[in-house]
Image (cartoon, grey):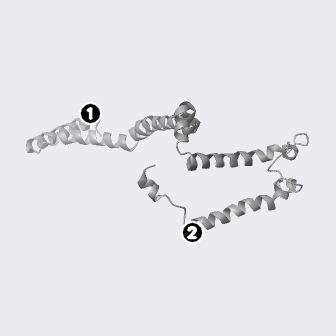
Amino acid sequence: MSHEVLHHVHESPLVMTIPLAVLAVGAVLSGAAGYHWFVGDGMAEFWGASIKILPENNSIEAAHHVPGWVPWAPLVVALSGIALAYLMYMFRPELPGMLAARFRPVYLFLLNKWYFDELYDWLFVKRSWQVGLGLWQGGDRAIIDGFGPDGVASVARGLAARAGRLQTGYVYHYAFAMLIGVVALVSWYLAFGV
């Protein structure tokens, strides 16, 4: 990182550190305090019907009988990772860059989180966007707006434009229109006698 960015790096203030410490202690102790109910003898009463455990396949009970190295493996791997990171970034800061250059494909694969975000984006986000676009263009614009508010408004505008062309502002045009109306009414009266 640049010297400017490195200059602004600092530890969180106590107003953040103290609540995090309280939450961390609570997370560790709640597992120890609730062990009896979560996975111990009181498990059936605690979980009730929310977890179905078959008598012939009690995986929670079977987890208590794994080899001794299995429960320690996550702690050993985590502490090894912390020690390796401390060694690489505190004592040999050139080592991460050399490893990244030497194992570039592996580095890029891990840096991009196994390309999971890209796969998720291609598989779900883009497909959802295409479905939404199709519903918006084909459903909302074409059907709802076409036959609904926009369709009615465009028909009203078209009829108003045609009616507006009939009104020229000349008196003789209006007199001629009234004369046609009178002839139509008299013809109707003579033809049907109503």
Q: What residue does disc 2 label?
A: 15
As displayed, is residue 8 above or below residue 59? below
Q: In the rendering, at what x and y percent does residue 154 appear?
A: 31, 40
Amino acid carrying mark 1 in the image: Ala
Q: Quadrant of the C terminus?
A: top left
State the image coordinates of residue 163 (x, y, percent, origin top left). 22, 41
Name the residue type under label 2.
Val
Label drawn at residue 191 = 1
Whether residue 102 is visible to the viewer of this picture, yes or no, is: yes
Relative to residue 93, is residue 172 drawn left or right? left
Vertical comparison of 127 with 41: above or below: above
- Residue 124, image x, y percentages: 55, 36
Point out the residue furthest to the right here: 55
Q: Which mark is residue 25?
A: none
Give 107 or 141, whichever is nearer the viewer: 107
- Residue 129 screen position, x and y as percent: 49, 37
Q: Is residue 49 left or right of residue 153?
A: right
The answer to whether mark 1 and mark 2 are in CB contact below 8 A is no
Q: Secondary structure at mark 1?
A: helix
Q: Quadrant of residue 192?
A: top left
The residues tagged by marks 1 and 2 sit, at their Cα atoms, a distance apart of: 97 Å
Secondary element at image label 2 = helix
Q: Residue at x 86, y 47 (%)?
A: 64
Question: Nearest the camera: 122 or 164?
Answer: 122
Q: Is residue 119 in sight in this rendering?
A: no
Disc count in the image?
Answer: 2
Q: Residues within 10 Å of mark 2 (few under 14, many from 20)?
A: few
